[in-house]
Image (spheres, rainbow, N blue to C red):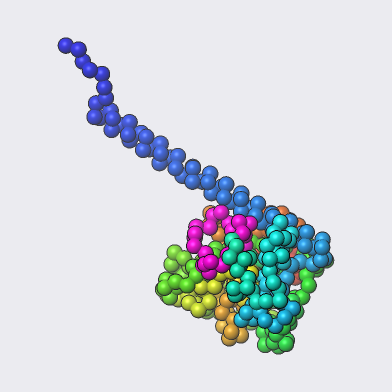
Amino acid sequence: MRREKGFTLIELLVVIAIIAVLIALLLPAVQSAREAARRAQCINNLKQLGLGAQNYISTYEAMPMQSNYNTSESQDQGFSWSWAVALLPQIEQAALFNSMNFSQGNYGLQITTAGYTQLAALLCPSESIGQRPGYPWGTSSYVGNFGGPGQIMAYSGTIVPPKDLLLNGSIGTVGWGGGAGIVRIASITDGTSNTAVFSEHLIGLGISNELATITPISRNAKRVIFPGTNSSAINTGAAGAMAAAKACMNLPATTLANATASPYLGYNWLLAYPTHVCLMNYMHVAAPNSLQCGNASDISYVQFVGPTGAAAASSNHAGGVNLGMADGSVRFIKNSIDLPTWWALGSRSVGEVVSADAY
C-alpha cells in the first residue's frame, strides 16, 4: 500500500515552536535597530539646532535668548517668543518666521499660521505621544540649557533670559539675581566642547484628568511637574545643589503632580517666560531622566520650575539623553553621570574642570 508523504502533528508543532523562538529572538533586535535609527535622527535634529545656533552667533555675535519680548506691550499673558522662534531663519524656516506679526501676541488667533505648525526638526522620533499637549499648537522635544543649579549660580547656561527684562528688576530683587543677559562665545569660558546648549525632554500630557493622580512612580511621571520638597536657595553652593537634586530624584511616592502647571509642559514651541524654565528649557540639576521639581524658595507665581528648581532633561532613549554642545557636537549622556559633572556641563563660566573621560 502506498503511503502519502506529509508532516505528522508533532513535526508541525515542532516547526511552529522553532519559528516562534526565532521570532522571539529577532523581535528585540528589530526593535533595537529601529530605536537606533530614531536616536540617530534625534542626534541629527540636535546637530541642526546646533548649526542654527552657530549661524545665529555668526549673524548677531550672541546666543539666541530664552525670552525675546515684543516691541509692543500686547503680548499675551506676559509670555514672550522662545529661542526656537529666533532660530527659525537659521534652520531653513525663514518663510515661517516671516509669517509672524511680532507686534501682536504670540498665543492667540493672530499667530496660528506659525503656532499650529509642528516642525519635524523640533520633535524627537522616539517621542511616543502622538497628540500634541496643546493641540492644535505645535510642541518641541528640544529645550535650551538654562544652566546648572541656581544654588551655585543662577542663569549659568547658554540659552538664558535677558537681564531683568520687562519685570522692573523683580527677578533681581525678589528672585535669583537677574537674568544673564547676552551670552557670547567669549562668555563660555568653561569651553564650548564642555558646555551644553540643547538637550531633549518628553512632552507633556496637556489638559488631562490623569494629571491629578500622577505620582513619582506613575508611568508618566517624567511628563509632569512636581511641587518639590526642597527649599535650598541661591548662594547655598554645592551642598544646596546636591540637596535639591537628591530631593527631586527621591520624591516621596505619594507626591502628586502640580495639576495647574503640568498641562503646559511642552505646550507650545513659541512660548517663553524668564522664570518658567519648563516651557522651552531644562536645567543641569538632577540627573538626566529624573523628575521635574519646583522649589519652595521660588517666588509664588513660578509653577513651571524656577531657577532654583530642577527641570530635568528626559527622553525615551534607553539609558540617557542626547546633549548638543556649544561647539556643535552632540553627545549621549547616561543617566548614571556623576552629578557635579552634569552640573559642570550645564554652566558656561563657573570654572569647573571636566575631563574627556568623565562622561
Question: Would you say the magenta stretch is mainly helix, strand or loop?
Answer: loop
Q: Residue at x 66, y 79 (%)?
A: 75
The quarter of the rendered structure image containing the N terminus is: top left
Confirm whether the magenta stretch covers residue 135.
yes
Q: Position of residue 253 (x, y in %)?
A: 44, 72
Q: Residue at x 59, y 58 (%)?
A: 123
> Which residue in the rendered view is the most extreme toward the top?
1
Closer to us: 6 or 116: 116
Q: Position of residue 209 (x, y in %)?
A: 41, 73
Q: Residue at x 78, y 59 (%)?
A: 55
Q: Is residue 211 visible?
A: yes
Closer to us: 66 or 7: 66
The quarter of the rendered structure image containing the C terminus is: bottom right
Instruction: Give, as a single range, the part of the protein colored magenta.
Output: 119-142
9 to the left or right of 353: left
Q: Is residue 147 visible?
A: no
- Count of number-bearing discs: 0
Q: Residue at x 50, y 79 (%)?
A: 260
247 to the left or right of 177: left
Q: Position of residue 313 (x, y in %)?
A: 59, 64
Q: Position of residue 184 (x, y in %)?
A: 80, 67
Confirm whether the magenta stretch covers residue 264.
no
The vertical placement of 250 against 236, above or below, is above
Q: Quadrant of residue 264?
A: bottom right
Closer to us: 95 or 234: 95
Q: Quadrant of residue 312?
A: bottom right
Closer to us: 302 or 102: 102
Q: Quadrant of residue 336?
A: bottom right
